[in-house]
Amino acid sequence: MGSRPIGQVQTEDVLSVLRPIWETTTETASRIRGRIERILDYAHSHHWREGDNPARWRGHLANILPKPTAVAKVVHHAAIPYRDLPAVFTQLGRQDGSAALAARFLCLTAARSGEVRHALWSEIDFGKQIWVVPAERMKAKREHRVPLTASALMCSGG
């Protein structure tokens, strides 16, 4: 497909890329399909190709390939039993690096991992001991104020 002019890419070309990996590395295949779709949409908007997007899922490839959830079962990781949490928390405290600090901060704030990973120093008021997560990063799209304990402040560099 890489050597074919973008205006000539058809459904079979897209399928030739996706079929070999669709059932074995479904998440990767799904992301590749999405990227191909965006590239072809870009080409269409610049008048480099005409017609429907052959990488479109809804109403097109969804009729040809099995749904990603049908071939790649979601495997959830077991939660740490609450009785084991103090030992795990202590072990995290012995480790160097930002990942261990972020995991401790996450435990102490009960925040979502994405909120913790994308936190900015400017969101943390060390004097008032509060973390203000802006609305655009919250699932509910509302600003969230998280009171911080001394331990949480230590994880965040305070």
Image: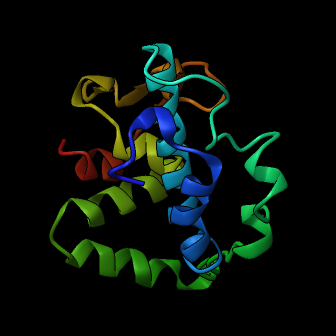
The location of residue 139, given as percent across then percent down, is 62, 32
- Residue 115, picture quadrant: top left
Whether 89 is drawn above or below 61: the answer is below
The location of residue 17, given as percent across then percent down, is 51, 63
The location of residue 88, given as percent across then percent down, is 42, 81
15 displayed left or right of 69: left
Seen from the viewer's position, the closer of residues 52 and 122 is 52
In the image, what residue occupies the spot 55% across and 51% down? 33
In the image, what residue occupies the spot 65% across and 25% down? 51
Q: What scheme was used to colour the molecule?
A: rainbow
- Count of marks, rendered view: 0
Whether 120 is drawn above or below 152: the answer is above
The location of residue 74, given as percent across then percent down, is 70, 72
93 displayed left or right of 117: left
Residue sticking out furthest to the top: 46
In the image, what residue occupies the spot 84% across and 53% down? 63
